[in-house]
Image: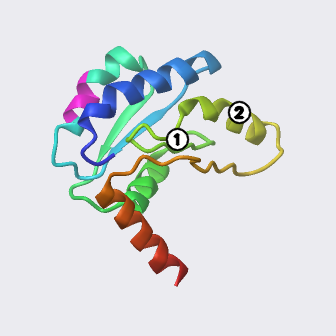
């Protein structure tokens, strides 16, 4: 997450509501060098929202989403890893269905695609520019 202090409690609450009924979980929140209080809010809210299994990874500077995801995956202890953005645009309610397919041996990986994005003007332009560079 990058500068997502306002979303931390909502994200943790959704993760807990959706995933805790399915058994123990490990949640890694990767702070991608936020300039706001994201990491502090994570630390304060962790014990009240997700009772166990929450760890916070803080990157020294903003390295970008790919580096933040890699940092989380490298530190994960669980055999199955799922990722969510901190902006609350990924619905944690999709995870149990995705997890079920992996656990059933139907596939090694499941990926979701957002049907509707709610980017800011700057975020949308940045994403389209990155996609243009990636696709040539």
Residue 73 percent location from the top left of the image: 49, 51
Question: Tag on residue 97?
Answer: 2
Q: Label 1 crowding class (10 Å Cα cut-off): few <14, some 14-19, many 20+? A: few
Q: Position of residue 108 (x, y in %)?
A: 74, 51
Q: Is residue 128 left or right of residue 106?
A: left
Q: Is residue 43 shown in magenta?
A: yes
- Is residue 52 toward the left or the right of residue 3 in the image? right
**What's the distance in space between the residues labelled 2 and 1, CA to CA?**
21 Å
Q: How busy is the neighbourhood of tag 2: few (under 14 within 10 Å), some, or many (20 plus)?
A: few
Compared to residue 5, the image places residue 62 above or below, namely: below
Q: Are marks 2 and 1 in contact (CB under 8 Å)?
A: no
Q: Left of 64 or right of it: where is 62? A: left
In reply to whether residue 1 is colored magenta, the answer given is no
Q: Is residue 19 above or below residue 71?
A: above
Foreground of the two, 129 or 54? 129
Q: Secondary structure at mark 2?
A: helix
Question: Which mark sits nearer the N-terminus, 2 or 1?
Answer: 1
Tell me which corner region of the image, top left, top right, bottom left or bottom right, holds residue 54. top left
Query: What percent of the width, then of the height, locates residue 34?
Result: 22, 48
**Mark 2 or mark 1, which is nearer to you?**
2
Residue, x 42% and y 37% (percent of image)?
Answer: 88
Q: Residue at x 41, y 64 (%)?
A: 127
Compared to residue 14, the image places residue 67 above or below, namely: below
In the foreground, 106 or 129 = 129
Q: Residue at x 45, y 57 (%)?
A: 70
Q: How many marks on residues?
A: 2
Q: Position of residue 125 (x, y in %)?
A: 36, 65
Say the numbered circle drawn on residue 91.
Answer: none
Q: Which residue is mark 1?
A: 77
Q: Which of the 4 image quadrants contains residue 97?
A: top right
Residue segment shown in magenta: 40-44
């Amino acid at each position: 997450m990058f500068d997502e202090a306002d979303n931390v409690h909502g994200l943790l609450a959704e993760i807990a509501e959706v995933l805790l009924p399915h058994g123990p979980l490990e949640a890694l929140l990767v702070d991608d060098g936020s300039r706001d209080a994201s990491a502090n809010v994570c630390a304060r809210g962790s014990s009240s929202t997700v009772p166990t299994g929450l760890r916070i990874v803080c990157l020294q500077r903003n390295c970008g989403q790919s580096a933040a995801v890699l940092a989380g995956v490298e530190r994960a202890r669980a055999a199955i890893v799922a990722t969510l953005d901190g902006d609350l645009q990924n619905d944690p309610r999709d995870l149990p269905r995705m997890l079920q397919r992996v656990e059933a041996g139907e596939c090694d990986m499941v990926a979701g695609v957002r049907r509707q994005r709610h980017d800011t003007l700057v975020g949308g332009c940045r994403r389209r520019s990155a996609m243009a560079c990636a696709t040539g």
